[in-house]
Amino acid sequence: MKKKYFGMFALAAMILSACSNDDIGSSGNSDIVTDPTGEAWVALKVITPSTPVTRALNNPDFENGTEPESEIKTVRAIFFTKDADPVVTADIELTNDEAGLSSTGQPTGTAGTAFKIPATSKHILLVANPSAKFPDKITTVSKAYSVINAEIAEEAGLISSTNGFMMTNAKGHLEPSLSNGDDTDLVLYKTSQAATTSPLSVNIDRVVAKVRVAINANTESSATINLDNGGWLLNVTNKKYFPVSERLATWYETNGGGFRAPFDQYRKGSYRKDPNFASHNVGTDYTYVAADPGDGNWLASGTSKYCLENTQDAASNMHAYTTHVLFKAKFIPNEYKMPGTATASTDQDEKGDWMLINGGYYTFTTLMSWIEAELTYKFNQPEPLLISTALTSAFNKYLGTEGIGIGEVVLPDDKAGIPATMNDFRNKKAAILGKSDTERAKTVGSLTYYAGAVCYYKAIIKHDDTDAAVNELGEFGVVRNSVYDIVVSKFNNPGYPIIPDPGTDEPDEEDEKWLSIQINVNPWTWYKQVEEF
């Protein structure tokens, strides 16, 4: 039995195929093997995804990985037959010498030493730092590619840590390929020397995506932004991934944008298909942030988080299926206007609570003044029944069964009843503040109550977004080996009083009143988005 030589890099893996000259047939070039009954030699040259490559997305459009993000602790070369669902012929864990790596797992830039593979091998899958849930190498021979590449359910942190970042073929399928991305067979050589002079490049990508957030508290003059005990979290993160995910073109890439991703060498597209690309089970496919995890659990500005790629077809561009960033901040109005010509109040209530009603900001104290003025105006008119009391009605509704359930106040029938009504309203304050922050914070009709001035915002992460389309394929989502920078440039408006529940009928392209985003994709492909709330 004879085997071939092979050489490869990790982001760009040089595959050098060769074989010994005993009992192996060849044609044309005397060093090329054509008889699949023997064995061949393989030599590898491994380079991780830190190699800079240009892309017209961000300037710069790539970002080199850190040493831990690029280190290869183990690398497996898995070889397959040419069948429709190829079968594993060999699964070899390479030594550092065979992979062309230094003792610290970094590529040396030179081809590794040769090793043997079966001559029946026609395709290759490279897996660096494989997950513990990826099929063990002693079990893979004779198994089909579809079995080897079956979906895996696990936390992103397990494949993006000091144990190593899992990396696989960037093509989204087996290699080698023709220049247009079509599959072709490995060229097998009879000698290691011949293989070394004819390397095959195979790019590999990290399996995870990376989201990095910067929050600038620059605000308009209408409010102060306090980030104490605030920050950001990822919401709607995928629980599953394919070791190798199929590439496909985004709407923009096929409608004038072109194929710009630096590691999309075959122009197949920068988007991917994850296990729940076209079908979704909200209960099992995603991790949701349903409630505030509490102080100390929010990530600070300038930090990053790894996550599994999460993509969807165009019809599924909905908040419930799209990874997004949650933000928590205190939005504290600088002043609260008073009725008539009275000077605006700058006092905050004791718990920092305030209310938004029809676009105006109110504390409990200032709202009492407005309600009294509203009722007084009503009963000073000749036809008081024709006069609406928007603020009074909104606050009373909040007190009632649709709100916090402490009982509505009986409204007066005439001007003489106003003092008693106002006394009843003021007596509600203790009951309101006796409720928990979670109970107080809510939207009821036209009134939104912010407990402790806490606001939540969300930014749907954009992949290949374009103004030329609305909610088309590939505009949203997070893709493996891509870094997404989310920069909050300012907070113009208050957000949600509680963490918003992402809706299955809530399109990604419509919730833009609180955010403006700029996205960059990275070796890590680098995406950046700027958000304005």
Image: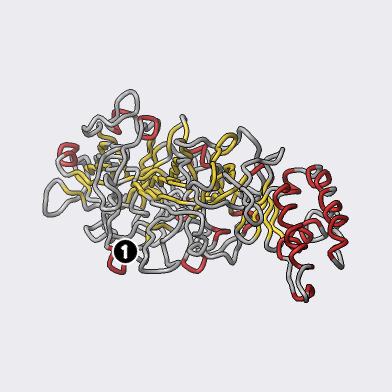
- Camera-side residue of 57 and 13: 57
Q: Residue 227: give x, y in percent of width and height.
A: 55, 37
Q: Residue at x 46, y 67 (%)?
A: 314
**What is the quadrant of residue 451 in the picture?**
top right
The residue wearing badge 1 is 253
Q: Residue 313: give x, y in percent of width and height.
A: 47, 65
Decide if residue 147 is in sight here: no
Q: Against 359, is 191 above or below? A: above
Give the structural element (helix, strand or loop) at label 1: helix
Q: Residue 198: give x, y in percent of width and height.
A: 16, 44
Q: Against 504, is 17 above or below? A: above
Decide if residue 116 is in sight here: yes
Report the label total.
Answer: 1
Q: Residue at x 45, y 46 (%)?
A: 488
For badge 1, the amino acid type reads Glu
Q: Residue 157: give x, y in percent of width and height.
A: 52, 38
For the N terminus, give its image quadrant: top left
- Camera-side residue of 254 and 156: 254
Q: Residue at x 86, y 64 (%)?
A: 412
Q: Residue at x 36, y 51 (%)?
A: 80
Is residue 50 found left or right of 292 in the rendered image? left
- Camera-side residue of 524 and 391: 391
